[in-house]
Image (cartoon, grey):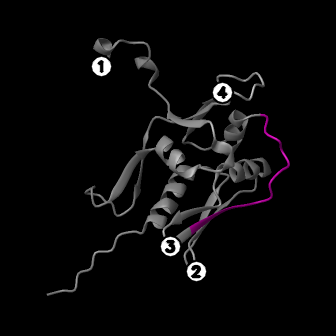
Amino acid sequence: MSDVRLKILPPWSIYIKMVEALFDGDPQIACNVDYNSSEPYIVLACNNGDKVAALQQILPEKFEFGGVTLKVAVDGTPSNRAFKNKKELFDVAFEKNPAYAYSVSPVDDGYNWFDITYVVFKNCVVQFFADNLNDCHGVISTLYQDLADELLTGPATNGVYFNTDVERGNLGKSLDEWP
C-alpha cells in the first residue's frame, strides 16, 4: 500500500493566486511571491508612479489568516498625484489591465455625502488553479468583480462597488424577450 497524502493549498496561497489573476495581463505590473520569509509576501512591482500611488490606496497592506499573515506591497516610487475622485483613482489603478472595463461615479458634483463609485470589469469568467476539490480540474471559476471585492479593501475603497459589465443586447428587454 502506498503512502498517499492529500495536500491542498493554504488560504494565503489561494489569495496570492487571486491577486495574480486580477492583475494578470497588466503590462505595467509584475507579481512576485516570496514564500521563503517567515511570512508569505506578495509584491506588485510597477514603474508607473501614478499607478503605484493608486494601488497603494486600494490594496491592503496585509491579509490575516488565523496565525498567518500575507503581506502585500506595491514596489515602485509613487507619484504625488492627488486623485480628484475614486473614479479617477480606479481608472489609473487599472489602466491597461485587460480585465477592466470602466468606472462610473453617478454624482460628480463635489458633494461628499453621496460618494459612490461603480468599478466595472469585463464580462468574462476568470479561472485559476487552487486545489479546488469541488471542481474536477481543481480550479476556481469566478468573476473579476468577486476577486476585486475580496482583495481591494484598502482605505480608498469605501463607497466603491465592483460590478461586471453586461451584454449590451440584453439591456432594456423584458424577461420574455431574453434569449
- Between 122 and 161, the one lying in front of the other is 161
For mark 2, give the secondary structure: loop
Q: Earlier in the sequence, mark 4 or mark 1?
A: 4
Local packing at callout 3 (Cα closer than 10 Å; few below 14, some 14-19, many 20+) is: few
Asked where in the image residue 114 lies, by quadrant, the reply is top right
The stretch in magenta equals 70-84
Using the numbered discs, state the Cα–Cα distance from disc 3 to disc 2 in whole angstroms.
Answer: 12 Å
Q: What residue is drawn where x is 68% and y is 37%?
A: 91
For mark 1, give the secondary structure: loop
The amino acid type of the residue labelled 4 equals Ser
The amino acid type of the residue labelled 1 equals Pro
The amino acid type of the residue labelled 3 equals Gly
Q: Earlier in the sequence, mark 3 or mark 2?
A: 2
> Where the N terminus falls, by quadrant?
bottom left
Q: What residue is drawn where x is 63% and y is 59%?
A: 30
- Quick check: marks 3 and 1 in contact, CB under 8 Å? no
List x then y, in percent, for residue 83.
78, 39
> Residue at label 3?
67
The reply to whether the magenta stretch includes residue 156 is no
> Residue at label 1?
179
